[in-house]
Image: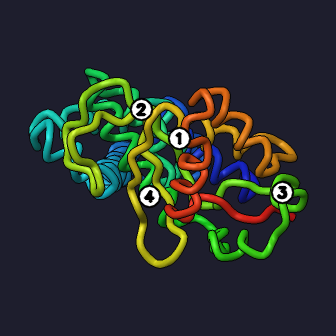
C-alpha cells in the first residue's frame, strides 16, 4: 500500500488529471464504481470552486450577467491555476480571465476589498499624532501602508459607483480597513504616487512630501498625505 502522503497526492492528481492517474491500490471494488465515485467527488469540488468565485465577485457577476459569469467561472475552475489554489485564494487570478479592462478592474477591486477585509489589524496614523512633533521628527517619521491597504490602478471608466466618488475619474482605488469597515477611496495621480511611495522600504514621511512636491509642483503638497492619513491608509512603522 502507498503511504498516506502518496495516497493523498495520487487522489488529488486523479481528481485533477483524470482516471489514468489513479493508483489501483487505493480502492477496492469494481473499477466502474470507483470511477463513478471519483467523478461525483470531482463535480462537488468543481461546484465548490464556482460557488467560491460567485461569492467573491458578486458585483462582477451582476455586471456581466449570471450566464456569462457562470461560463467564465466554469472554465477558470477547470484550469491548472484554479486547481492549484484553495477556495480562499481561488479568486486571485480570476480577474485576468475576464474580457475588457473595465470588468477586470471591477473584479480586482472586489478582490482587493476581500483582502482588506481579511487583513491584519493595526492602528492607523492620525493627524492628531503628528501635531506633537517638531519639523525634524515629523519629516523623519517612519511610515508604512496599513496592512489592509490595497491599491488598484484604474485605466477605464468605473462600471460601479464607488463611495466618495463624484464626477472625477480616479487613477486608482484604494481599499483599506483601518477600523471595522472596508473603505473604497478614489485616488488622483498624485495621491496614487504618494500611496505607492509609502510602501517603499524604510519610507519616512519626508519621502512622501518629496513625491508630492515632485508631482504637484509645490501646489498644496500636503493634501495627498492628509488624504491618505484621513483614509486610515498609513501606520507608524517599527
Task: Give residue 24's quadrant in the image.
Answer: top right
Tell us which disc is closer to us: 2 or 4. 2
Which residue is pictured at 55% across the width and 42% down the height?
220
CA gap between label 1 and label 2 equals 9 Å
Query: Which residue in the protein does label 4 denote?
Result: 114
Disc 2 packing (10 Å; few <14; some 14–19; many ≥20): many
Quick one: label 1 or label 2, which is nearer the N terminus?
Answer: 2
Q: Left or right: where does residue 233 sit relative to residue 235?
A: left
Report the number of numbered marks.
4
Q: Is residue 226 visible?
A: yes
Quick one: label 2 or label 4, which is nearer the N terminus?
Answer: 4
x and y percent of residue 139 in the render? 83, 53
Q: Are marks 4 and 1 in contact (CB under 8 Å)?
A: no
Q: Secondary structure at mark 1?
A: helix
Q: Left or right: where does residue 45 sit relative to residue 67?
A: right
Which residue is pictured at 87% across the width and 64% down the height?
238
Which labelled disc corresponds to residue 142?
3
CA gap between label 3 and label 4 equals 27 Å
Q: Are marks 3 and 2 in contact (CB under 8 Å)?
A: no
Task: Give residue 77's quadrant in the image.
Answer: top left
CA gap between label 2 and label 4 equals 20 Å
x and y percent of residue 41 in the render? 36, 54
Work out which residue is located at the far top of the displayed protein and give it: 100
Tell us which disc is closer to us: 4 or 1. 1
Query: Which residue in the protein does label 1 denote?
Result: 191
Q: Secondary structure at mark 2?
A: loop
Q: Left or right: where does residue 3 sit relative to residue 155?
A: right
Between 202 and 91, the residue placed more toward the observer is 202
Between 182 and 235, the residue placed more toward the observer is 235
Quick one: label 4 or label 1, which is nearer the N terminus?
Answer: 4
CA gap between label 3 and label 1 equals 19 Å
CA gap between label 3 and label 2 equals 26 Å
Amino acid at each position: 500500500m502507498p503511504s498516506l502522503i502518496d495516497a493523498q497526492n495520487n487522489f488529488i492528481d486523479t481528481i485533477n488529471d483524470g482516471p489514468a492517474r489513479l493508483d489501483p491500490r487505493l480502492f477496492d471494488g469494481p473499477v466502474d464504481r470507483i470511477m463513478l465515485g471519483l467523478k461525483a467527488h470531482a463535480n462537488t469540488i468543481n461546484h465548490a470552486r464556482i460557488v467560491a468565485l460567485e461569492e467573491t465577485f458578486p458585483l462582477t457577476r451582476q455586471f456581466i450577467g449570471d450566464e456569462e459569469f457562470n461560463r467564465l467561472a466554469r472554465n477558470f475552475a477547470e484550469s491548472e491555476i484554479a486547481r492549484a489554489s484553495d477556495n480562499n485564494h481561488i479568486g486571485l487570478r480570476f480577474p485576468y480571465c475576464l474580457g475588457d479592462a473595465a470588468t477586470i478592474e471591477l473584479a480586482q477591486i472586489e478582490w482587493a476589498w476581500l483582502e482588506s477585509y481579511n487583513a491584519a489589524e493595526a492602528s492607523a496614523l492620525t493627524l492628531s499624532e503628528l501635531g506633537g512633533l517638531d519639523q525634524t521628527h515629523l519629516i523623519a517619521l517612519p511610515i508604512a501602508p496599513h496592512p489592509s491597504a490595497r491599491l488598484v490602478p484604474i485605466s477605464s471608466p468605473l462600471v460601479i459607483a464607488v463611495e466618495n466618488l463624484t464626477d472625477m475619474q480616479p487613477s486608482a482605488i484604494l481599499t483599506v480597513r483601518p477600523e471595522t469597515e472596508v473603505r473604497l477611496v478614489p485616488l488622483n495621480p498624485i495621491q496614487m504616487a504618494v500611496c505607492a511611495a509609502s510602501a517603499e522600504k524604510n519610507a519616512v514621511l519626508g519621502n512622501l512630501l518629496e513625491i508630492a512636491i515632485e508631482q504637484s509642483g509645490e501646489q498644496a503638497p500636503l493634501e495627498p498625505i492628509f488624504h491618505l492619513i484621513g483614509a486610515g491608509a498609513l501606520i507608524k512603522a517599527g
